[in-house]
Amino acid sequence: MLRIGFVINPIAGMGGRVGLKGTDGVVTEAERRGAAPVANARALEMLQALESLLAGTSCQDTVTWLTADGNMGHDALRAAGFTAIEILHRCRNVASALDTTGATENFIASRVDLVVFCGGDGTARDICSITGEATPILGIPAGVKMYSGVFGVTPHRTAEILARYLAQQIGLARVEIVDLDEDKYRKDEWAVRLYMSARCPFEPNYVQAAKALVSGQDKKR
């Protein structure tokens, strides 16, 4: 059985859709402007596509999902029809980066083979700060600013990547985690930094290429 950690950042992408150029630190303002969550819908789209791709294959019953409760993972997995689920993290009333890193720490302690997440570059940074290059990660795109190389280009393409990885048709590649400074971006300053590297199931036609415009290329470890 393959053990996959699965976590959703439920606020990813909200800010950018109401003109805030990201969501970091501005969730309340995004909600005030009428922003609606999109990450769970993106995650469910990926999971439903994956369930369809795995149906009738030798991989169908080979995955155990380790996740967080509620809208940080469990709800979407159940809605997609998966049943081999273990809840390892209980969320706060309002999900935060501490929930993302806390869930990931629990995944690593339980020796997951892969961490799949739904969010943006900030979520990728939070998760990779725990996994490093030791545990592979794969992202479902839900954020507004998407610069890292760990994301499938769409939720459905992410499902195809994961299905091929489970079938051992593709391997892992070293990719870059980069992020845009949202505070500077809101002041019309472009500041994208390369932070670290990760390993990711790799299908070159389906995985997003990390953007080339990077400033301050010193890595933070």
Image: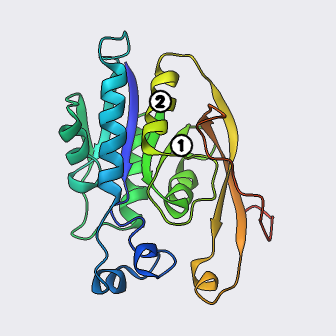
Q: Amino acid at mark 1?
A: Gly
Image coords of residue 39 (percent x, y)? 35, 57
Q: Amino acid at mark 2?
A: Glu
Label 1 vs 2, first from the N-terminus = 1
For the C terminus, the image quarter is: bottom right
Give me the residue at 25% from left, 39% from top. 77
Classify residue 18 by image quadrant: bottom left
Q: Residues within 10 Å of mark 1 (few under 14, many from 20)?
A: many
Give me the residue at 33% from left, 43% from top. 45
Vertically, is 108 above or below 33? above
The CA span between labels 1 and 2 is 9 Å
For the residues bearing labels 1 and 2, Cβ distance under 8 angstroms: yes
The dot on residue 160 is: 2
Tell me if I can see residue 124 in this picture: yes
- The residue wearing badge 1 is 152
For the N terminus, the image quarter is: top left
Furthest toward the bottom, the residue is: 187
Q: Pick whichever, 174 or 130, lies toward us.
A: 174
